[in-house]
Image: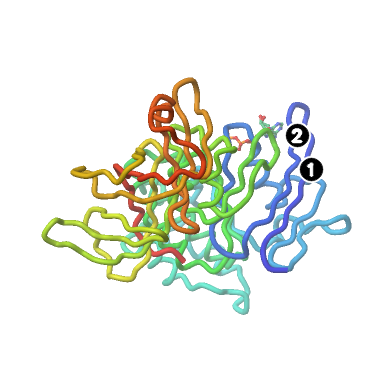
Amino acid sequence: MNGIRARFVLHRDDFKLESEFTAPALGITALFGPSGSGKTTLLRCIAGLERAQGSLNVNGETWQDEQTFVPVHKRPLGYVFQEASLFPHLSVRANLEYGYRRTPASEQRVKPEQVIDWLGLAHLVERRDPAQLSGGERQRVAIGRALLTSPRLLLMDEPLSALDSASKQEILPYLEHLHRELEIPVFYVSHALDEVARLADHLVLLQQGRVIASGALHETLARLDLPTAHFDDAGVVIEAEVAAHEERYHLTRVDMVGGQLWVGLLDQPIGSSVRARVLARDVSLATQMPQGSSISNILQSTILELSDEGADKVNVLLAVGDSQRLLSRITRRSRDLLGLEVGRVVYAQVKSVALMQGEKR
Ligand SMILES: Nc1ncnc2c1ncn2[C@@H]1O[C@H](COP(=O)(O)OP(=O)(O)OP(=O)(O)O)[C@@H](O)[C@H]1O
């Protein structure tokens, strides 16, 4: 079987994990949920650090079922923790190569130079004082060290949460780059929706130890029935393609299913893929094509669903073209004044688009 199939039951005194989900064979699956929802516990079950009841199959290999429990040290996985713990007496290179040297040559699937390149570590490898590296650099070395054990699954537990926001911004492009290069699945624990929107392909949503949704990222983020729709930064992720550059206005046009968007000039060739995030609060609606508007991103769309959001707001799910979804958050007053209802054709005015650089897989 290709892909990952997991089912775990673990009862603690005041917490029950009863989770079942499937995830794709490749790409990043985010384990997302509020504090205490069981993300780390679930990751530890996958690693075999917790002896839960249940089963786990990773791309055709059984790591756990009624008869089997592969112990943690025999599971071909890499684990990256919130805080990187490097060996302080070893150089950066020796840290990186620690697991590599212990992996039989026949099982080595990546080479140190490749990982050093992916993670931008070339200027750091000769350093003998890993404790003096910045938090972001340490975490990159920790990720590199995990990858050099040639794992068949990479587990990352909030790898950015201990970093300040500048270090986070510095490391994110490396994670995006890894996302394109890695040929193994990754589970990525996070409670930050912006990180998930930027990195993940698949989303497993946890609440009180249970999986309340599991699906492709762009589909899951467009669901009004899930807690993510109530977030202040609720919104969709759009996969688009660079279509044209307008140097004169410092703009780039990206094409997506059902329409196009203008964004700040991108340093990427025509035809390359980009991921954009459009927040519901940045999308307003009009019943006629707006004339004389300074907003250049206007998408004709059809209302699929409306759902009250608090006392004064409404979330609106829109279809742009056949398959692209968009969320809009407007006031209840606007809904009533415009007579918005399911099936109505409207014009979505997109006030802001966050571009996440890099080609998607
Ligand atoms: N070793 C343990 N013994 C008993 N209870 C635990 C243990 N580890 C975690 N818990 C409890 O299990 C629940 C789930 O914890 P877990 O760390 O998996 O959640 P989480 O979603 O990762 O949270 P956070 O985002 O805060 O890290 C919590 O109620 C926690 O207090």
Name the residue rendered at 23%, 53% in the picture.
264
Find residue 104 and report its horizontal and vertical position in percent.
Answer: 63, 74
Of marks 2 and 1, which one's residue comes earlier in the chain? 1
Above or below, comparing residue 206 to residue 253 in the picture: above
**Residue picked out by circle 2:** 16
Residue at the right extreme?
A: 67
Name the residue type under label 1.
Answer: Val
Q: Residue at x 42, y 54 (%)?
A: 238
The single residue placed furthest to the top in the displayed view is 311
Spatial separation of the CA atoms under disc 2 and disc 1: 7 Å
Give me the residue at 70% from left, 37% from top: 209
Q: Which residue is mark 1?
A: 9
Q: In which of the image's four quarters is ligand 1 placed?
A: top right
**Whole-percent x and y of residue 253?**
26, 60
**Residue 64 or residue 140, whichever sits in front:** 64
Q: Are marks 2 and 1 in contact (CB under 8 Å)?
A: yes
Q: What's the mark number on residue 111? A: none
